[in-house]
Amino acid sequence: MLSPRLFHKILGVALFLFPCCAEGKPAGNWLLPVFGHLVGDGRDEGFMPGMQFPPPFLSRSEDVIRQLEHRISRLEGVLRFKKMITESGGKIFATNGKKADFDTTMKKCKEVGGSIATPRNPGENDAILYFVKDANTYAYLGMKESLIPRKFQFLDGTELNYTNWHLNEPSGKGEEECVEMYTDGTWNDKKCNQNRLIVCQF
Ligand SMILES: *[C@@H]1O[C@H](CO)[C@@H](O)[C@H](O)[C@H]1NC(C)=O
């Protein structure tokens, strides 16, 4: 069942992938034909041709929710097809294909309602690795060194309950506060000012 949270996620992904629109520049009216339907009247043309709206046995809101689900699942199909999103559990990961340092990556992800990709289990690590491999470019992850050298934590300060360090990492002895993902999915501690692939989660 479609939740407002999921809708918000999808919208965030769309704005992330089409930054022209997030930054407020005129971008044509692609957003309207796609999302106008989502919030518009269900009797608009274009939905499941042949089906009559509203069927007498469905309430108006069930009707709208079905159309939203149908439309969003098709959008997800397009984004997967274009290699723009991956999913694991309830999380959606996306890249815009650009590179940035750690702080800029955080900012870019936040601007579009997401956050920097943070793998919390092997499935999520793989979902991020997909982009790292595809772009053949390392990516920063949402974790940082704590005040104790070589002890890393999630950005909210909680302890890592999953790690995938490369052999003999972390090795920065407090000098490398960020974490990057290698193209084999393992992690390395690294200074935060390198250019790395931007991967966000939603
Ligand atoms: C760590 O905790 C998060 C939720 O707090 C969970 O989603 C994740 O799967 C956990 N990771 C492992 C490896 O158990």
Image (cartoon, helix red, strand yellow):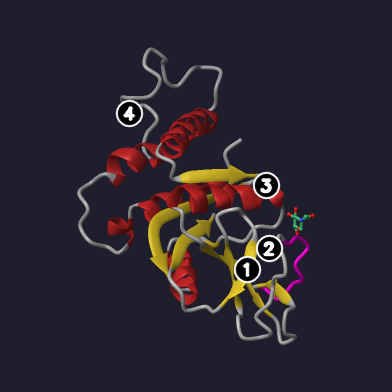
Residue 170 locus on image (x, y percent): 69, 73
Q: In this picture, which residue range is highlighted in magenta?
A: 156-163
Q: In which quarter of the image is ligand 1?
A: bottom right
**Residue 188 has which mark?**
1
* Quadrant of the image containing the N terminus: top right
The reply to whether the C-beta atoms of the residues labelled 4 and 1 are less than 8 Å apart is no
Residue 108, image quadrant:
bottom left
* Mark 3 Cβ inside 8 Å of ligand 1: no
Q: Quadrant of residue 201?
A: bottom right
Residue identified by numbered label 3: 123
Is 102 drawn above or below residue 135 in the view shown?
A: below
Q: Is residue 5 visible?
A: no
Q: Nearer the viewer, residue 10 or 81?
A: 81
Residue 160 is covered by the magenta coloring: yes
Q: Position of residue 21 (x, y in %)?
A: 29, 56
Camera-near label (2 vs 3) is 2
**Mark toward the start of the polypeptide (4 vs 1):** 4
What secondary structure is marked by label 1? strand
Instruction: Check disc 1 and give the amino acid type.
Output: Asn
Q: Disc 1 vs disc 2: Cβ atoms closer than 8 Å?
A: yes
